[in-house]
Image (spheres, rainbow, N blue to C red):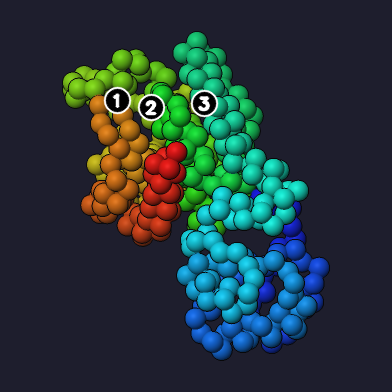
């Protein structure tokens, strides 16, 4: 959790280790194991004595029978599982009141970054429509800010901030960027590759700048002529970037191929099977999922579980191994987003 690393020195200390170092200089302990087992409670008590950590504030993760732990150890705080960074930060703020303001302010950066990125997408559209070049440095800078913002907060904070914007086209790109970051993070991508994926996600629909807004916002079904224009947006987007002459091949692939399907039924190139690289497969999954769960003027957002069913129903078109890998990401971030919006 990068935000914690900014304020604390982090150390993983398995209870099962045969030797333990002195932890008396550490500020807080985050504890995650089953305290319903009496033997483990005894082992943990001994662990605290061996490491001189009896007096260190303790945060117990629910699902570890935190209530039993508190009763047995007569100290500590409890948070839910899976760990919600906002809840954890709130508890840490109670333990360290002097740091509470600084730590709690981090999620607010999601709103600031989303506004900046929204403005960038608007500027890109104007630049494309006027025949000017897109600033690669500017877009990649935005992608880095998204990665940093989500890393310091949560994907939920990001999606909640993005949902404040009215324009579906821009909101969708920011939505997909957040989901793509969460997916890449879940799969263990390094920082550079996460930045590249988010850059491609931000730009994946840049070709829509060449399509009339009335068509993009149309609520009734598109005519055949309109469909033929719409399916050209990946080609338009890739050509825009090629004309700039400064974009890497992966970003070009992400923009051009995000509507391609494994069975060859996608567009614009009708690629199939191994002709579609893994990063494109990832972006396509995030794109399809976002289209299902985001609201439109002519349709309501659908439940995340139904959206996942939609992805699984597309066997043959989508990479099912990747869909399975995406499932915990999609359900977690969207369910939490729904809860956050309901609570607000």
Looking at the image, tell me whether mark 1 or mark 3 is earlier in sequence order.
3
Would you call the spot at circle 2 few (<14 residues within 10 Å), some (14-19), or many (20 or more)? Answer: some
Q: In this view, does 158 lie above or below 29?
A: above
Earlier-in-chain disc, 3 versus 2: 3
**Quadrant where the image shows the N terminus:** bottom right
Q: In the image, what residue occupies the spot 50% across and 10% down?
A: 130
Tell me residue 11's x, y (percent): 70, 67
Residues at marks 2 and 1, CA–CA distance in whole angstroms: 9 Å
Residue at the image position 62 percent from the left and 46 percent from the top: 152
Does any portion of residue 172 appear in the rendered image? yes
Under tag 1, what secondary structure? loop
Q: Residue at x 45, y 26 (%)?
A: 165
Residue lying furthest top: 130
Query: In the rendered structure, which disc, 2 or 1, sits on the residue that comes first in sequence?
Result: 2
Whether pointer 3 and pointer 2 mark residues with C-beta atoms closer than 8 Å, the reply is: no
Which image quarter: residue 111? top right
Which residue matches tag 2? 168
Q: Which of marks 2 and 1 is in front?
A: 1
Which quadrant holds residue 208? Answer: top left
In terms of image quadrants, where is residue 38? bottom right
Q: Does dot 2 land on a helix, a strand or a loop?
A: helix
Q: Name the residue under label 1.
A: 297
Q: Which one is in front, 97 or 117?
A: 97
Q: What element carries label 3?
A: helix
- The label on residue 118 is 3
| 203 relative to 336, above or below | above
Q: Tell me, yes or no, whether the two marked residues, 2 and 1, touch with CB atoms within 8 Å.
A: yes
């Amino acid at each position: 959790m990068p935000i914690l690393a900014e304020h604390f020195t982090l150390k993983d200390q398995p209870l099962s280790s045969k030797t333990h170092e002195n932890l008396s200089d550490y500020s807080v302990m985050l504890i995650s194991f089953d305290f319903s087992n009496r033997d483990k409670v005894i082992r943990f008590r001994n662990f605290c004595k061996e490491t001189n950590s009896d007096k260190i504030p303790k945060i117990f993760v629910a699902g570890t029978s935190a209530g039993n732990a508190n009763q047995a150890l007569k100290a500590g705080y409890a948070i839910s599982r899976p760990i919600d960074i906002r809840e954890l930060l709130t508890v840490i703020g109670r333990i360290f009141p002097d740091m509470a303001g600084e730590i709690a302010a981090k999620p607010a950066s999601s709103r600031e970054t989303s506004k900046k990125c929204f403005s960038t997408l608007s500027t890109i559209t104007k630049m494309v429509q006027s025949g000017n070049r897109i600033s690669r440095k500017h877009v990649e800078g935005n992608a880095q800010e998204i990665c940093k913002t989500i890393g310091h907060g949560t994907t939920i904070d990001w999606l909640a901030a993005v949902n404040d914007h009215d324009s579906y086209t821009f909101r969708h790109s920011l939505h997909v960027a957040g989901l793509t970051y969460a997916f890449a993070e879940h799969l263990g991508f390094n920082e550079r590759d996460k930045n590249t994926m988010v850059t491609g996600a931000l730009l994946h629909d840049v070709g829509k700048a060449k399509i009339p807004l009335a068509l993009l916002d149309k609520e009734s079904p598109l005519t055949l002529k309109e469909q033929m224009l719409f399916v050209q947006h990946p080609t338009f987007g890739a050509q825009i970037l090629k004309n700039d002459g400064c974009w890497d091949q992966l970003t070009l692939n992400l923009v051009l191929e995000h509507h391609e399907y494994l069975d060859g039924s996608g567009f614009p190139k009708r690629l199939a099977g191994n002709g579609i690289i893994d990063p494109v497969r990832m972006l396509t999954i995030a794109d399809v999922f976002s289209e299902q769960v985001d609201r439109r003027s002519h349709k309501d957002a659908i439940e995340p579980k139904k959206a996942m069913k939609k992805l699984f129903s597309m066997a043959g078109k989508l990479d099912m191994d990747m869909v399975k890998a995406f499932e915990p990401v999609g359900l977690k971030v969207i369910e939490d987003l729904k809860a956050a919006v309901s609570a607000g």
